[in-house]
Image (tube, grey):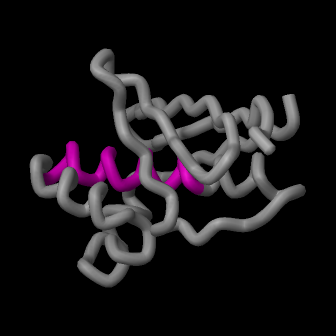
Amino acid sequence: MKGIGTDIVENDRIRKALNDSFMRKVLSPAEIEKSKDYKEERLVQFVAGRFAAKEAIIKCLSDYEVPILSELNITNNDKGKPEISYRNYQILLSISHERNYSVATAVLEGIDY
């Protein structure tokens, strides 16, 4: 393991900030497109989860670089597990939601040189 990061977000904080400008700062273009599939509470959870995950990724990469939130594009595999492909880093990612909070952990396993 080369790095680890965890972040927790209060969903109400995201709900209050949710506008086009905030979405462009936090989400990649592909994630903005995906967010159009969601309404109301599920949209808040989606954005909050992505925000927490990206903050966790930034923390786990902090010894190497600090990416911009919108540069990071988180996808889900066919089983729903979140995944991140960013440069040459091997990163494991987990996102969870509870009624009031979203939390994420990122683990940097290695770097492909």
Provide residue 81's location: percent of width, then percent of height. Answer: 41, 24
User: Where's residue 71, x and y in %?
Assistant: 50, 66
Q: Relative to the observer, which residue lies in front, 113 or 16?
A: 113
> Is residue 49 on the magenta stretch?
yes
Q: Where is residue 11 in the image (x, y as percent from the top left)?
A: 40, 52
Residue furthest to the front in view is 113
Above or below residue 22? Residue 81 is above
Magenta span: 39-54
Pick out the residue farthest to the bottom: 21
Horizontal and vertical percent position of residue 49:
43, 45
- The secondary structure that most of the magenta stretch takes on is helix
In-image side of 20 versus 81 (left or right) = left
Q: Residue at x 79, y 34 (%)?
A: 110
Q: Residue furthest top?
A: 79
Decide which of 19, 94 is in the foreground and name it.
94
Is residue 43 on the magenta stretch? yes
Q: In which quarter of the image is residue 3?
A: top right
Please state, as top left, top right, bottom left or bottom right, where the C terminus lies in the image. Answer: top right
Give me the residue at 65% from left, 36% from top. Answer: 91
Name the residue rendered at 62%, 56% in the picture.
Answer: 55
Image height of 99 relative to 10, above or below = above
The reply, left or right, for residue 34 in relation to residue 4 is left
